[in-house]
Image (cartoon, rainbow, N blue to C red):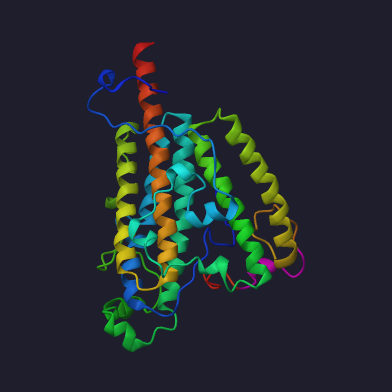
């Protein structure tokens, strides 16, 4: 992409530097921060300095196995979305593609485990259903606070 | 088409009923810079986006915004659930209550209903991308003002996550803008 010096650049338009993927946060760190890419991690200073703020769902009180497993599904899917959006603008980045594929394989395994234990995550035909139709089972995502 | 996943993108917790906070957070549900506006803006603009990368970015970010809409709705729902009427009145949410009880309704923080006038699709992909970058910045600012207003650390954590997504989306739209200028120049010279 455009690497011309500033003076040769066209006027009257905005420029955003194009990201080059090198490293990423580990799984839970990226999920908690809202991006897996350290160079895009730009937290609001007021939150960063607030000692009251804790990641309450991960660091304490999550003894519930269902929620623990759900966090892994969520974190892997979040990672996949991050690579997905990156690859949309960098379709030829082989490293990002390889890491996307690794994430997909991990997600498939964990998702299958979650669905076997706790019921379907989708009703679109990707997993055969047990009897009676478990899709209607509560709680729905907005009801469990998580 | 779309497939629903029976889970939130990011876990939502609230410390207890808080209609005062619900009243302002609802703006990210049905307000001008909210998640519904974002989703519908991108999903509408994609039809006149000529660039393959841009079609993907608009589709995928538009889809992620639907997940954010669900997160914001879950926040509002849980902040209103079990809120006593006295607390709702004290928070100045009695007018909302009169029309909607504790139901979710698409309004901004001062009660103005959602309108298509919040979004634009101009037919010029460069113009649309500038709108999208501005929209991400407006949403980022809104989350910062909401964080300033929040007295619930569980809610602040969710707002902080959503705010960071705006930063990432801005970057992707910015990269799409670079690709769009290259595409325009290729068309102009060859």
- Residue B10 visible in image: yes
**Residue furthest to the left:** A12
B23 on left or right of B165: left
In-front residue for pair A11/B7: A11
A52 on left or right of B98: right
As drawn, B74 above or below A18: below
Residue B174 figure quarter = top left
B3 on left or right of B176: right
Q: At x 75% / y 62%, what residue is drawn? A: A116
Q: Can you give x and y, in whole percent of width and height, for residue B103 in the image?
A: 40, 74
Residue B154 figure quarter = bottom left
Q: At x 41% / y 75%, what residue is drawn? A: B79
- Residue B107 visible in image: no
In-front residue for pair B33/A8: A8
Is A95 part of what is drawn in magenta?
no
As drawn, B130 above or below A145: above
Q: At x 55% / y 41%, what residue is drawn? A: A83
In-front residue for pair B109/A105: A105
Q: Can you give x and y, in whole percent of width and height, for residue B168 in the image?
A: 43, 45
Which secondary structure type mostly characterizes the magenta part of the structure?
A: loop
Q: Can you give x and y, in whole percent of width and height, for residue B91 in the image?
A: 28, 80
Q: At x 65% / y 73%, what residue is drawn? A: A63
Residues rendered magenta in the picture: A130-138
| Quadrant that contains the C terminus of chain B | top left
As drawn, A5 above or below A59: above
Q: Can you give x and y, in whole percent of width and height, for residue B29 in the image?
A: 37, 62
As drawn, B146 above or below B95: above
Is A132 part of what is drawn in magenta?
yes
- Circle count: 0
């Amino acid at each position: 992409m455009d690497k011309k010096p500033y003076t040769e650049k066209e006027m009257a338009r905005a420029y955003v530097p194009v990201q080059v993927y090198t490293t990423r946060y580990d799984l839970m760190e990226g999920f908690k921060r809202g991006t897996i890419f350290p160079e895009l991690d730009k937290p609001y200073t007021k939150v960063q300095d607030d000692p009251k703020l804790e990641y309450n769902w991960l660091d304490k009180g999550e003894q519930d196995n269902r929620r623990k497993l759900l966090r892994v599904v969520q974190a892997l899917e979040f990672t996949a979305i991050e690579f997905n959006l990156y690859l949309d603008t960098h379709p030829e980045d082989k490293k990002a593609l390889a890491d996307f594929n690794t994430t997909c394989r991990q997600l498939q395994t964990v998702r299958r485990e979650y669905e076997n234990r706790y019921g379907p995550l989708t009703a679109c035909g990707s997993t055969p259903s047990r009897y009676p139709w478990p899709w209607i089972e509560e709680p729905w995502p907005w009801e469990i606070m998580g | 088409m779309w497939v629903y996943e029976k889970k939130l993108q990011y876990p939502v917790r609230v410390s207890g009923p808080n209609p005062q906070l619900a009243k302002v957070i609802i703006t990210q549900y049905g307000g001008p810079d909210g998640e519904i506006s974002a989703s519908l803006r991108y999903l509408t603009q994609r039809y006149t986006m000529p660039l393959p990368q841009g079609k993907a970015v608009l589709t995928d970010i538009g889809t992620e915004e639907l997940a954010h809409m669900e997160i914001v709705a879950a926040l509002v729902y849980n902040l209103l659930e079990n809120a006593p009427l006295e607390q709702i009145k004290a928070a100045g949410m009695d007018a909302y209550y009169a029309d909607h009880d504790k139901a979710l309704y698409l309004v901004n923080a001062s009660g103005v209903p959602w309108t298509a006038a919040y979004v634009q699709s101009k037919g010029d992909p460069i113009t649309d991308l500038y709108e999208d970058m501005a929209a991400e910045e407006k949403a980022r600012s809104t989350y910062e003002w909401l964080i300033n207003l929040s007295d619930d650390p569980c809610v602040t954590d969710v707002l902080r996550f959503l705010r960071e997504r705006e930063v990432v989306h801005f970057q992707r739209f910015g990269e799409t803008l670079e690709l769009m200028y290259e595409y325009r120049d290729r068309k102009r010279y060859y």
